[in-house]
Image: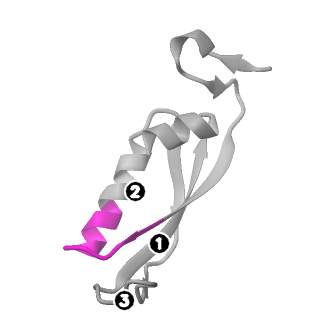
C-alpha cells in the first residue's frame, strides 16, 4: 500500500515522511569527531534528513569497565525509507 520501487530493491513510501531517532556513542580515538562523522554519514543517505541533534553527554562504560568513557548523542531524522532500508544504510 503506497509503496514505490519495490521491484528495484528500494522501498520507500510516497509522500509519507517518518520521524526516527538514532542514538550513537563513541569511546575510541577522537570521540567528538567520530560522532560528527556519523551524523554526516546519516545525513548523506538518500531519502534521509537529519533534523536536529542532542547535546553531547559523557557516560561511564557498562559491563566492561576497563575502557575509556563514552561520548553519546541522539539525533532526529525524517525519512521515507522503510525501517529495513534505513537499517541497511546505517
- Residue at mark 3: 65
User: Which one is in front, 66 or 79?
Assistant: 66
Q: Residue placed at 35% from the left, 48% from the top?
A: 41
Looking at the image, is mark 1 or mark 2 earlier in the sequence? Answer: 2
Contact? badges 1 and 2 (CB < 8 Å): yes
Residue 71's quadrant in the figure? bottom left
User: Which one is in front, 45 or 24?
Assistant: 24
- Residue bounds of the magenta highlight: 24-36
Residue 46 colored in magenta in the image = no
Is disc 1 placed on a helix, strand or loop?
strand
Mark toward the viewer: 3 or 2: 3
Tell me: residue 14, above or below residue 89: above
Tell me: residue 89, above or below residue 68: above
Q: CA distance from mark 3 to mark 2?
A: 26 Å
Q: Residue placed at 44% from the left, 39% from the top?
A: 89
User: Which one is in front, 39 or 29?
Assistant: 29
- Residue at mark 1: 73
**Which residue of the protein is positioned furthest toward the left in this rendering?**
29
Quadrant in which the N terminus is drawn: top right
Does 75 sit left or right of 64 as displayed?
right
Amino acid at each position: 500500500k503506497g509503496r514505490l520501487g519495490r521491484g528495484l530493491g528500494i522501498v520507500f513510501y510516497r509522500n509519507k515522511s517518518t520521524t526516527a531517532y538514532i542514538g550513537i556513542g563513541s569511546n575510541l580515538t577522537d570521540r567528538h569527531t567520530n560522532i560528527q562523522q556519523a551524523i554526516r554519514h546519516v545525513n548523506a543517505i538518500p531519502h534521509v534528513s537529519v533534523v536536529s541533534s542532542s547535546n553531547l553527554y559523557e557516560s561511564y562504560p557498562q559491563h566492561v569497565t576497563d575502557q575509556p568513557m563514552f561520548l553519546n548523542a541522539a539525533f532526529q531524522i525524517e525519512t521515507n525509507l522503510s525501517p529495513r532500508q534505513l537499517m541497511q544504510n546505517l
